[in-house]
């Protein structure tokens, strides 16, 4: 299984069957922590700072400066949304990043 399939699989599991991976707590915070852990693992495996890369991409996308990770900023930016909607936005944002950046694992100088 390739990495993109694993990422898509993670997003699908969190959308369809979150209790398979979140151990009973399906709050936004649990989604955030799980996704950050997954991304830190990918960052370590590929020797990149994926959380920072997604944060910079998200900042450009919403055209705003922020001093926190993208996962922390979603509840701030979308402050009027329900927790379920925030989780949907979180997963959609993650999915969008990987769709728009298919060569995410390559160092910038190689692009």
Image (tube, rainbow, N blue to C red):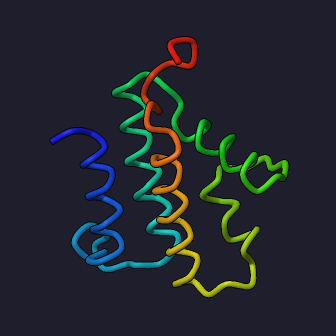
For image coordinates 74% across by 85% down, the residue present is 80
Foreground: 85 or 100? Answer: 100
For image coordinates 36% across by 38% down, the residue present is 41
Decide: is 45 above or below 99: above
Q: Is residue 87 left or right of residue 24?
A: right
Q: Is residue 18 left or right of residue 53?
A: left
For image coordinates 38% across by 25% down, the residue present is 46
Position in image of residue 84 (x %, y %): 52, 84
Instruction: Count all numbered tags in the image, as a single digit.
Output: 0
Decide: is 67 above or below 103: below
For image coordinates 45% across by 67% down, the residue present is 31
In the current view of this chain or complex, which residue is farthest to the left? 1
Position in image of residue 47 (x %, y %): 43, 22
Which corner quadrant holds the N terminus? top left
Decide: is 45 above or below 65: above
Q: Quadrant of residue 26?
A: bottom left
Position in image of residue 88 (x %, y %): 50, 75
Position in image of residue 62 (x %, y %): 76, 56
Q: Is residue 67 left or right of residue 48?
A: right
Foreground: 24 or 60? Answer: 60
């Amino acid at each position: 299984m390739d990495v993109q399939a694993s990422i898509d699989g993670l997003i699908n599991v969190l959308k369809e069957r979150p209790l398979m991976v979140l151990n009973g707590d399906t709050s936004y915070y649990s989604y955030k922590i799980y996704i950050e852990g997954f991304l830190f693992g990918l960052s370590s495996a590929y020797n990149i700072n994926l959380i920072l890369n997604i944060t910079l991409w998200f900042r450009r996308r919403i055209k705003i400066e922020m001093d926190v990770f993208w996962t922390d900023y979603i509840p701030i930016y979308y402050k009027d949304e329900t927790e379920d909607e925030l989780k949907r936005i979180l997963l959609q944002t993650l999915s969008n990043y990987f769709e728009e950046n298919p060569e995410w694992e390559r160092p910038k100088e190689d692009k």
